[in-house]
Image (tube, rainbow, N blue to C red):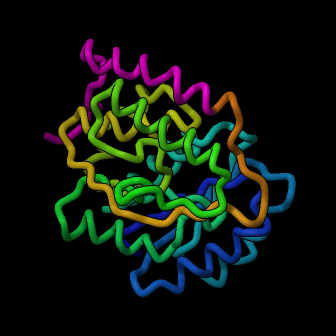
Amino acid sequence: MSDSLVIIPTYNEKENIEKILRTVFELEKAFDVLVVEDNSPDGTAAIVKKLMPEFPERLYIEERKGKLGLGTAYIHGFRWGLARKYEYIFEMDADFSHSPADLERLYHACAHEGADVAVGSRYITGVNVVNWPMGRVLMSYYASAYVRFITRLKVRDTTAGFVCYRRKVLEKIDMNRIKFVGYAFQIEMKYTAWKLGFTVKEVPIIFTDRTEGTSKMNKRIFREAVLGVINLRMRGITGQIKPTPEAKS
């Protein structure tokens, strides 16, 4: 068993899932992968199950009854990984918008550079986004600026979904208090880790929009991210962000 688990949520990713898994398993650093599958009608789960005998004790799948939201998929994966003693737990998309090669850089930031949370950042060295229309780039960039202004969180890419958490961070975050399920989930996790005293480090990456499959972004998800930030800030001010009662000091 590796010390590192990559969680990949999937819904209708048949065009990408086999390629992304093989690419991760070809890396020099060993990573295990958990696919959290939300009952895709396109047969994504069957592709993963077909590959599991080829990668025994490295590839796992958890199937859920339906499309329950990105945040709940990751929380499911976090709990699964914590129960199995992984020291580093990653979030990554299935569509190659995050380069699997950058997993090693995020790992290095946490394992060797003192970070508790390593964020694959599109905006720490300018704007490193490929294949997005300018309107979406501006929306994402200024949304992160808005989050920083409201929350005072010192992270330039607050909505980034390519992240490595050290085990101790996820042990201390009370998953029952995480409220959001869409892109606001990414903001809430970073903000919560920061409020609990952990070190968040941004690692520059190049984000490339998917070339196959369909994006899951929609207006409801974006609205949750924008409006939820004010609620998040108020919870921080009023002391509602607390560690899990079982957390080690």
140 left or right of 233 in image: right
Comparing 205 with 163, the one in front is 205
State which quarter of the image contains the N terminus: bottom left
In the image, residue 22 above or below residue 78? below
- The relative height of residue 187 versus residue 59 in the rendered view (above or below) is above
Foreground: 36 or 212?
A: 212
Residue 15 vertical placement versus 219 (above, below): below
Residue 151 left/right relative to 222: left
Q: Quadrant of residue 221?
A: top right
x and y percentages locating residue 162 in the rendered image: 47, 57
Q: Which segment is the magenta one? A: 222-249
- Residue 107 sits in which quadrant? bottom left
The question of residue 102 being in magenta is answered with no
Whether 227 is among the magenta residues is yes
Residue at the image point whose x is 67% and y is 52% from the top: 133
- Locate the C terminus by quadrant: top left
x 86%, y 58%: residue: 42
Horizontal side of 241 relative to 128 (left or right) equals left
State how many labels appear: 0
Say whether residue 219 is left or right of residue 226: right
Residue at the outermost left position? 249
Which quadrant of the structure image shows residue 247? Answer: top left
- Residue 201's x, y, as percent? 27, 54
Which is nearer the eye, 105 or 155? 155
- Whether residue 14 is visible to the viewer of this picture, yes or no, is yes
Q: Position of residue 222 (x, y in %)?
A: 61, 32
Name of the residue lying farthest toward the front: 134
Residue sitting at 28 percent across and 71 percent down?
108
Residue 85 seen in this snapshot? no
Measuring from the top left, give residue 79's x and y in whole percent: 45, 47
Please determine whether, in this image, residue 80 is positioned above or below residue 149: below
